Amino acid sequence: MNTETISREDIIEAFNFRHATKEFDATKKLTEDDINFILKTANLSPSSFGFEPWHFVIVQDQELRELLKPVAWGAPLKLDTASHFVLGLSMKAPMVKHDAKYIEHMLKDVKQMPSDVIEMYSKFYREFQERDFNLDTDKKLFDWSSKQTYIALGNMMTSAALAGIDSCPIEGFHQEQAEALLREKFGVDTDKYGLSFMVAFGYRKADPEFPKSRRAFEEIVTWK
């Protein structure tokens, strides 16, 4: 791998370029290669224990986008103008509990660990849930899954920015109502998955009205 392919300056420039795009240019669309590149960076994102507790639904059907508007107050303009609109789903307790079938599948079939390593890894994961992070309720387990899915969200938005593509992450939705809609109209098994975020991709209609503002670097970093 050529680690000098992208300069540090270009990476920082991409971070400065990225902003929460409120309205996209509806006439400009991502190519199939563009969106697959972005989704591939989600696929390759790290997650705790490497369990990838996520799924992404790309909503291109305009009728389905219209159905999302009443349950997502932060999304209507993005639903109307974004080239691609993605729902970030995270696994609920039945999928990620230490003794879940999915965890067994990940260790045995995906990671292809030998049985003795699976036994050791499973022990670490159980101790992590029960002792280290005290993940003893369904809500805590879903929140943990969501934290992992947000890593993929960050990587998708960063990779998009590096490619000159705009994005907007969205939490402006009613979670319970949105999940009911996903269950009824999108075929999502909401016993297994919950909605963590929405994110839109496309090309900005106009440049941001205000410059990017952040706290001073010295305010957020402490050296010991």
Image (cartoon, rainbow, N blue to C red):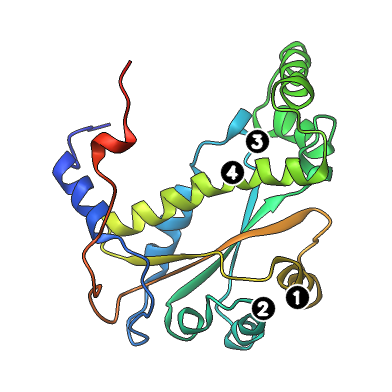
The numbered mark, 2 or 1, whose residue comes first in the sequence reads: 2
Report, in whole angstroms, how far the alpha carbon at label 4 lies from the one at label 3: 12 Å
Residue type, numbered disc 4 = Lys
Report, in whole angstroms, how far the alpha carbon at label 4 lies from the one at label 2: 22 Å
The numbered mark, 1 or 3, whose residue comes first in the sequence reads: 3
**Quick one: label 1, few (<14), some, or many (20+) residues within 10 Å?**
some
> Is label 4 or label 3 in front?
4
The reply to whether dot 3 and dot 2 touch (C-beta < 8 Å) is no
Q: Which residue position holds label 1?
A: 181
Q: Residue at x 70, y 66 (%)?
A: 175
Q: Which residue position holds label 4?
A: 147
Determine whether, in the image, residue 62 is placed left or right of residue 131: left
Report, in whole angstroms, how far the alpha carbon at label 2 lies from the one at label 1: 8 Å
Instruction: Give residue 71's mark.
Output: 2
Report, in whole angstroms, how far the alpha carbon at label 3 lies from the one at label 2: 30 Å
Residue type, numbered disc 3 = Phe
Instruction: Give residue 51's mark.
Output: 3
Q: Residue at x 78, y 39 (%)?
A: 102
The reply to whether dot 2 and dot 1 touch (C-beta < 8 Å) is yes
Determine whether, in the image, residue 122 is placed left or right of residue 208: right
